[in-house]
């Protein structure tokens, strides 16, 4: 069986790095990694995950995304983990900060999806996994995380809409929304469970299993039942 090429964005650190190491153990996949600034870290992750290559790009810049995809070539599976975070009241949030959050969490994924879709349609096969945040399916007041949830809720809507459009082309699009991960801002907060990277990795493997090929448009929360108030 021919290996499927996976592109993981934001693979230099944290969740992206863990997913690279997890998927690198699967013989069915050929792994390609993206990073932005952490050149030393991505070299280490690439070696540990047996990746065939790694590419630098600022995914908020469409021209850089296009260049990266032209270098990579075929992408069968796209896993978007890029996204920054701020934790402050809106009155303290600057216009550029809000813009950066939207670009990093929403537009970066959209640009990569747009570049990956033509080849997936041509081959009539594609898997796209986006990452949200627990509770992003609920429109409510988020006093300290409004810009972040604006972006993640939009990404969920995008994921579900694309899933409906692309199912006829053999492409599935799903979203995983973790709770508080080991490196997160809210880690060690009282009564908030910390989610190990391994739990998220197993969820990714579940979505990529061909037995689950008809699962598309799903939003899976990996949060041990916790939701932000």
Image (cartoon, rainbow, N blue to C red):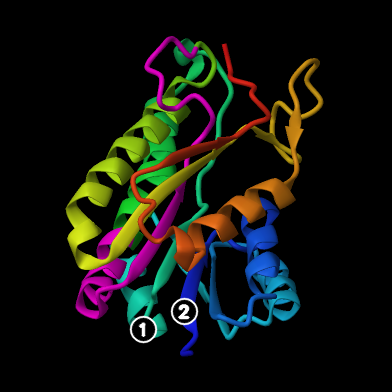
Q: Residue 43 location, x and y as percent? A: 69, 76
Q: Viewer-nearest of labels 1 and 2? A: 2
The numbered disc on residue 46 is none
Specify the quadrant of the image occupied by residue 36.
Answer: bottom right
Q: Residue 97 location, x and y as percent? A: 45, 32
- Residue shown at 29% from the left, 36% from the top: 157
Is 27 covered by the magenta stretch? no
Let me know if residue 217 appears in the view: yes
Residue beneath disc 1: 73
Q: Residues within 10 Å of mark 1 (few under 14, many from 20)?
A: few
Q: Report the magenta residues as a range.
A: 113-142
Q: Residue 135 location, x and y as percent? A: 49, 24
- Residue shown at 46% from the left, 90% from the top: 2
Specify the quadrant of the image occupied by residue 144.
Answer: top right
Let me know if residue 61 appears in the view: no
Q: Residue furthest front?
A: 211
Q: Residue 141 location, x and y as percent? A: 44, 9
Total marks in image = 2
| Image: 172 above or below 46 | above
- Quadrant location, the C terminus: top right
| Image: 146 above or below 107 | above
Element on which disc 1 rests: loop
The answer to whether 80 appears left or right of 50 in the picture is: left
Q: Are marks 1 and 2 in contact (CB under 8 Å)?
A: yes
The numbered disc on residue 5 is 2
The answer to whether 151 appears left or right of 63 in the picture is: right
Q: Residues within 10 Å of mark 2 (few under 14, many from 20)?
A: some
Element on which disc 2 rests: strand
Q: Which label's residue is closer to the chain start, 1 or 2?
A: 2
Q: CA distance from mark 1 to mark 2?
A: 9 Å
- Residue shown at 56% from the left, 18% from the top: 88
């Amino acid at each position: 069986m021919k290996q499927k090429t996976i592109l993981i964005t934001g693979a230099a650190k944290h969740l992206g790095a863990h997913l690279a190491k997890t998927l690198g153990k699967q013989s069915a996949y050929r792994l390609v990694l993206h990073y932005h600034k952490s050149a030393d870290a991505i070299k280490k992750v690439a070696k540990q995950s047996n990746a065939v290559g790694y590419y630098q790009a600022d995914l908020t810049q469409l021209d850089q995304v296009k260049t990266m995809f032209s270098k990579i070539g075929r992408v069968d599976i796209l896993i978007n983990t890029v996204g920054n975070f701020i934790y402050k009241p809106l009155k303290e949030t600057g216009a550029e900060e809000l813009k950066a959050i939207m670009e990093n969490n929403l537009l970066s994924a959209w640009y990569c999806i747009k570049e990956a879709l033509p080849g997936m349609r041509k081959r009539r096969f594609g898997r796209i996994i986006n990452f949200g945040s627990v509770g992003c399916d609920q429109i409510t007041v988020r006093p300290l995380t409004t810009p972040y949830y604006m972006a993640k809720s939009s990404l969920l809507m995008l994921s579900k809409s694309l899933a409906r459009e692309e199912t006829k082309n053999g492409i599935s699009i799903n979203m995983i929304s973790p709770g508080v991960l080991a490196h997160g801002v809210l880690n060690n907060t009282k009564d908030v469970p910390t989610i190990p990277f391994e739990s998220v990795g197993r969820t990714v493997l579940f979505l990529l299993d061909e037995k689950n090929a008809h699962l598309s448009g799903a939003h899976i929360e990996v949060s041990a039942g916790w939701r932000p108030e």
